[in-house]
Image (cartoon, helix red, strand yellow):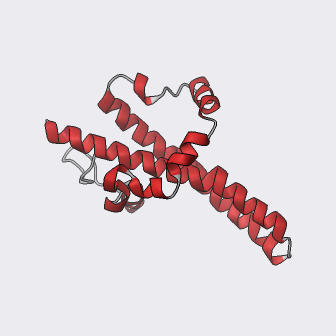
Amino acid sequence: MTDNQPSETEPSQTLTQKMAEWYFTPNKIERWRNGRMYELLGVRWYKDHMPIQENDRALRKKGIRPIFVLDSLESGLEEWEKRTRGFEKMHGVSGIILAVLTNPLIISGHYEIATMNTLLNVIINFYPVLTQRYNRARIYNILEKREGRK
């Protein structure tokens, strides 16, 4: 998972798949000190204050189980890593759409509404993207440590 090299049994990747893999694979600074960069940006504070209980209930209704109840730590982490990509895509696309929709408000001089939209976008989309990247960096670190023990 951590070396980004397709195995002999995997078909070669398309350019789009390679770009997605490059984007979603945490780099060294993201993985540094187990996600410290994201903690400095306030992701831990955000995670501690988001309504996680409601989120957990909503995920369970959709059949998504928290990582700690999945079959094994390693398969659970690999599954959760895939889910972080999906959540990041969802919030990333939503964030881009909301940012694009905010531009006409700025052009037409509705600065207060544009400011509110931007703040809402940061809370609803930007920090969730950072949270998923933070989670993924930590998952990669755990999996790399486990691979080193084998």
Looking at the rendering, which quadrant does residue 27 occupy?
Answer: bottom left
Please give the name of the residue rendered at 52% of the width and 50% of the height, measured from the top-left corner. Answer: 43
Please give the name of the residue rendered at 82% of the width and 71% of the height, measured from the top-left corner. Answer: 111
97 vs 106, left or right, is left
Please give the name of the residue rendered at 61% of the width and 33% of the height, measured from the top-left corner. Answer: 55
Looking at the rendering, which quadrant does residue 21 occupy?
Answer: bottom left
Front in this rendered view, residue 61 or 27: 27
Give coordinates of residue 102: x percent, y percent.
75, 66
Quadrant (top left/top right/bottom left/bottom right) for the C terminus: top left
> In this rendering, is residue 8 above or below 77?
below
58 vs 147, left or right, is right
Asked if residue 15 can be seen in this view, the reply is: yes
Give coordinates of residue 134: x percent, y percent.
44, 50
Give coordinates of residue 94: x percent, y percent.
65, 54
150 vs 135, left or right, is left
Asked if residue 94 can be seen in this view, the reply is: no
> In this rendering, is residue 51 above or below 63?
below
